[in-house]
Image (tube, rainbow, N blue to C red):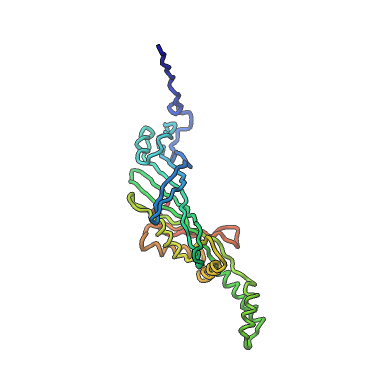
Amino acid sequence: MKRESISPPLPDVAAGPHLGSPLALEWVGMQGIALPLWLEEGGQAQQVHACADVHVDLPDPTVKGIHMSRLYLLRRMVDSHADCGSTQARLALAFPVLRRQPALLTAGLSGWKSYPVRLHASCSPQGFALSLTVEIGYSSTCPCSAALARQLLADAFAAQFGAGGIDGTAARTWLREHASLATPHSQRGTATVTVPLTEQAELDLFPLIDLVEAALATPLQTAVKRADEQAFARLNGANLMYVEDAARRVQAALAPRQEQARVTVRHMESLHPHDAVAQAGSTACVF
């Protein structure tokens, strides 16, 4: 007769005595859980590698710890932690979205651009909340630096040609050789936009990205040839921006459609060892 082996019960350390300080904790959970997601945007589906952060509150100071294995479904996360006194849960999904971007002028030339995206969901006695955050890169040229560079160029031009009649060919030749004797500083910037969503809402990522990039007018490029780089230089020259200008442009573009949008703009200065930042919009989307 075959004997059945009986395994001893596995130890449950979490159910043991609470030896630490009896304090409530705002959030407890897991961070950086890898998982695949399928995202449909612009009529095409793409698989993205996402990282998930999941937490519940631990308001009961007598409870040793939460049940990590139960942190997989947002609405059930709170119910499954009733024995911990939990009333709130939150989930954040971070992933990049790839989009093909054509060159400014060169036909048939394009490259892929990545946009960092973050979805944040929370469940509490106040209800369910969902928001979308996307980072959009662009370039900007400092208006003050541009004015200072133009002054140096004007002074050098006057010293070369004086106040008399100017030969057009000679002036053009001189400008080709000396127009960059002073160049304004430019920098890469990021516009981080957060908008609230309803539970059944479409993400509409690409329309949101298009709206922001059109407002800034100088989105970062991927594949370029010399003609495209020259066109990009023209765009930067026509859209000189302080960080305040960029934030207001994005805020004004979003206002008619997203009254509760939150905008954070950051310029990674090439002149200074620090960044310039500006924020605008609703605080309802800040987590």
Residue at 42% x, 32% y is: 63
Residue at 38% x, 55% y is: 43
Q: Where residue 178 appears, x then y in whole percent?
A: 65, 75
Residue 4 image-quadrant placement: top left
Residue at 47% x, 42% y is: 34
Residue 158 image-quadrant placement: bottom right
Looking at the rendered image, the quarter that the N terminus falls into is: top left
Q: Is residue 130 left or right of residue 242?
A: left
As rendered, which of 38 and 219 lies closer to the eye? 38
**Residue farthest right in this picture:** 160
**Residue farthest bottom in this picture:** 165
Q: Where residue 284 appears, x then y in whole percent?
A: 39, 53
Q: Where residue 225 appears, x then y in whole percent?
A: 56, 65
**Residue farthest top in this picture:** 1
Q: Is residue 238 left or right of residue 178?
A: left
As rendered, which of 137 and 27 lies closer to the eye? 137
